[in-house]
Image: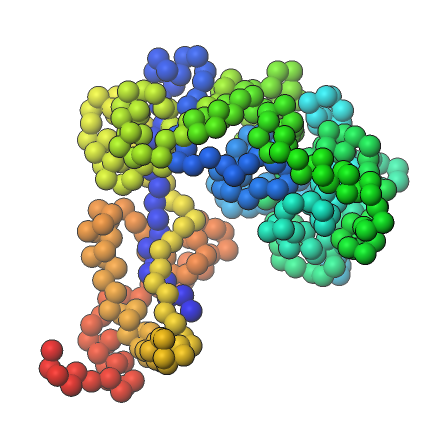
Amino acid sequence: MKFLCYSSLIILICCFQIGCKKAQNNTLVVHLLSEPDDMHPTNGASAVRAEINLYTNLSLLRVNYKTGELLPCLAKALPAVSSDGLSYTYEIKDGLSWDDKSPITAADIAFTTKASKCLYTNNPGLKPYWENIKEIKIDGTNKQKFTIVMKRPYILNTWFWTDFPIIQEGFYDKQKTLAKYTEEQLTDSTFLKTKADVKQWADEFNSPKYYTDPNFLSGAGPYKITKWDKGVSITLEKKKDHWSENCQENWYCQANADKIIFKLNTNNASAVLELKNGIMDVSGMIDYASFTELSHDENFTKNYTLKLADTYNYTYVAMNMKPDGQKHQKLFNDVLVRKAMALLTPYEQINKTLYENHNKRVVCPISPNKIDFNADLKPVEYNVKKAIELLTQAGWADTDND
């Protein structure tokens, strides 16, 4: 069982101010600690890849990061849900198009689902997320409207769509191979043994060019990857004559910088030096000590804004509730001992010593930033006397008076 240390992590964001010389060419240089594993439309899972996808791709739904609420992205609205919680009906917004100016339709939603579920697609770690989708039914009279039929009701049947970009059938499956088969057939190994065309499509789709070659990366977002210099940087450029130019309703289709360069620097000291020299505009990756140092540098603060921001992370201590008694001693299988440990953790001292009191106590894995957080929950307070009482009740005693 995890015993939470109830101390939320806080990240650093350094933003180069708009009035500075560096920003006048409308290019934003963003600090990265690591490169994405790849930028394949379905076969990657790194956090950096997901961040870049926010600029280059769009999903059916998105999250409002200010409120934590679900909001429509490619969809006109949140879905109409059947009474049994199994059918979710959506309609794609009007006027949305791919880079070749063809419209984004329900067929692209169906293709994204089939490509992700197909047994031959090289995304084994992500397939379980798609498993609950039974089929996509496209409306016979409206190519923008469709119904997603699920196998079972589940709380994440809608939220699930925020994590995966919708990809273009016309770009990744020009022969419409997957459209000939159902989701069930594409996940049936026996059936697929007789379908050489599906294997041929998958071999092409899984080929290296779709992982890192900008010429074979296509998405619905306002930016496109134009250069990937391995070990150095990834360059995104704002698309010209893109439908998002007239879309200011939400952050996901706004494109303010003409170019965004994600610059790799794994050395903290070197990253700080590049920030001081104006080589990078934004970093959320430097350590807390460096943040403190920079915040006291008057020359630096003239050009940069430094900010501490809440994240959805937390630190914790894990205690084994079911030890085997051999490799792991039976210490924390008693609830009284676990409660005593909670009372003996010097939360405020840890926060003051390590984080200068900038961290916040949290009482459960649900972030206080979320609307469904229970604000009535109270954190455990440091109390040695009460802890000793609980340990005594549990049968523990100081037998050697130390």
Determine which quarter of the picture holds residue 272: top left
Which image quadrant is residue 94 in? top right
For image coordinates 51% across by 42% down, the residue present is 46
- Specify whether 59 is left or right of 338: right
> What colouring does the structure picture have?
rainbow
Which residue ends up furthest to the left in the rendered image?
401
Number of dots carrying numbers: 0
Residue 389 vs 58, above or below: the answer is below
Residue 52 visible (yes or no): yes
Judge whether 364 appears above or below 66 on screen: below
Q: Position of residue 19 (x, y in %)?
A: 36, 16
Up the image or down, 336 lies above or below 98; here it is below
Q: Position of residue 280 (x, y in %)?
A: 36, 24
In the image, taking residue 282 as reference, residue 250 lies left or right, namely right
Query: Residue 246: which quarter of the image?
Result: top right
Q: Quadrant of the C terminus?
A: bottom left
For the N terminus, the image quarter is bottom left
Q: Position of residue 62 (x, y in %)?
A: 59, 40
Most foreground residue, 193 or 168: 193
Q: In the image, what residue occupies the spot 41% across and 23% down?
A: 29
Residue 383 spot, x, y in % from top left: 22, 70
User: Could you say which is closer to the camera, residue 42 or residue 82?
Assistant: 42
Frontmost residue, 276 versus 9: 276
Q: In this image, 370 relative to 158: left or right?
A: left
Residue depicted at x 30% and y 49%: 359
Answer yes or no: is residue 104 visible: no
Residue sitting at x 23%, y 62% = 346
